[in-house]
Amino acid sequence: MNSPLGERRVTREVRAGKVGVGGPNPIRVQSMLTCDTMDTAACVQQTLDLAAVGCEIVRITAPTVKDAKNLQFIKEALLAKGCDVPIVADIHFKPEAAMESALWVEKVRVNPGNYADSKKFLVREYSDDQYAAELERIRSRFAPLVELCKQRGVSIRIGTNHGSLSDRIMNRYGDSPLGMVESALEFARIAREMDFHSLIFSMKSSNPKVMINAYRLLAARLASEGPDWNYPIHLGVTEAGDGEDARIKSAIGIGSLLADGIGDTVRVSLTEDSVHEIPVARALVAEASGRRPQIVPLAFDPFSYRRRESHTLDFGGVRLGGEETIRVVVRRETFDKVAHKLSRMGDYQPEIVYEDAGIKEIDPRDDRAVSLLNESASDYLITVRDGTDMPLIAAFRLLAAKLDPRHPILLKDTLAPPDSQPEFLPTLLTAATNIGSLLCDGLGDAVLVQGEPAPGQSLRLSYNILQAAGSRIFKTDYVACPSCGRTLFNLQTTTAKIKEATAHLKGVKIAIMGCIVNGPGEMADADFGYVGGAPGKVNLYVGKKAVKFNIPEAEAVDRLKDLIREHGKWVEPAALVNA
């Protein structure tokens, strides 16, 4: 089929105060405050700091009516300092807080899974009449907010989170991208029946594959509903974590969708001070703005993940293709630079040398070259030739569409390797966007990072992209939310403590959540969860089930280690074993 992916999706403009989102506007960059909403001075200072580094929209949590009332004083103090950056109130459980917030801010974000709903994860079949009754109950809670926002010119973001789908949605559609989309559309239909159209949508998940599929499905569903469903879309990978891994995961999710032409505003969620989010977001937007869109046929389902089938090849005992592990390829020059220290490189090992592998390089537009490979009796590892004048993602999608599926594919991060040492952040984001996008499409049996000349960094980047895309787990995996006014402990220091204690647990996935808002759902993919339950108290989870409650924060990391032991996934660090 021909892909709708590539050209930027055309939307109506929705205003958040002075800032237009969608329509003819550039892709907007936003962030969220990490401080207590009742601390007016801190909220004002953080907002000023964010605006100073290029943040265009600022979100503040309003978990209670009391917090929502304080938005008035935050807004007044900002205006007194000459700062008119639009403020978004973040609402989850309390419609009353949303109503109060709408009196003072330019935009209100509601989470359909929490707003007027509860998450109990009950197994229950809803009849059509019961389902309709649930929707009517939601209408009674949501319609007053819509009416108030319509009167005041306030926009609404309907922000679905994979981690907080309602029981009603979970039991009818499952914990799926379809459930995420349907959850948002239920609320959108109520707004539209009231002739309210200042809507923005989001579909956040900590899993880039789920996120990408959900946003693509959302864009397709909006288009199928009719031309006047052309609402803007906000992008974000929730609970991305911190450091290099978080930037890679964000680039895979956000960068991939921007490359597909989806997204009008973005937020990079880091478990770091908010100002560190803005350079990453701006770099992703700049990268997307400089891309040439190109529509090509697709050989994969853009709405669900399935790895492309291929034959298995053997390279000196290293097997790839089929159901084998996705491998890391390096150039001979890189291998020679690290050959003397392979024993000290741990899991970051070069596995195949490019020049030794008989790799076939082609321009996927060259039908004769493709036909010769398809007609050959042998199976080859195939890649796109450097210098091919096509957008990289489109080039590899076209290759996959034309190539006999028996041939495995080698993915690259760039088709124009640099002559000198580039800046690392843009290199990282480009590599994660390009390779990560294709991995989440189900394409690729090996990867080659050649945009980063430093051998150690290029190898680390290769493996970290595979980990973030969920394609190859070689170390502990963390899901860590960004801090906000709901957070019940210091996320940055707590995340560092948990990593220090558990970073050697290869293949174990740990979720670190500051509060319960998205905890159980986002932890569905995690083995263990560490969640703020009350001030100074932590609840521990196995999967999305809470198993230990109200643990004093000072003891919680040790109790987490005990829980991991109880479930047979603890091993002692090598340094202690060998001591």
Image: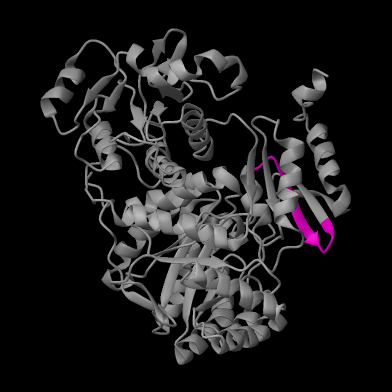
Is any atom of residue 133 visible in this view? no
Percent across and percent down for residue 124 are 64, 56
Residue 5 vs 372, above or below: the answer is: below
Percent across and percent down for residue 569 are 75, 30
- Locate the C terminus and report the quarter of the image it occupies: top right
Q: Is residue 453 left or right of residue 577?
A: left
* Residue 387 figure quarter: top left
Q: Is residue 529 magenta?
A: yes
Q: Main secondary structure of the magenta part?
A: strand
Farthest residue toward the bottom?
151
* Residue 16 figure quarter: bottom left
358 and 257: which one is in front? 358
Which segment is the magenta one? 526-537
Farthest residue toward the top?
316
**Protein image colouring:** one colour
Q: Is residue 530 magenta?
A: yes
223 and 276: which one is in front? 276
Q: Is residue 442 left or right of residue 341?
A: left
Residue lying at 59% horizontally and 29% vertically, measured from the top left: 474
Percent across and percent down for residue 329 are 41, 22
Residue lying at 28% horizontally and 69% vertically, measured from the top left: 226
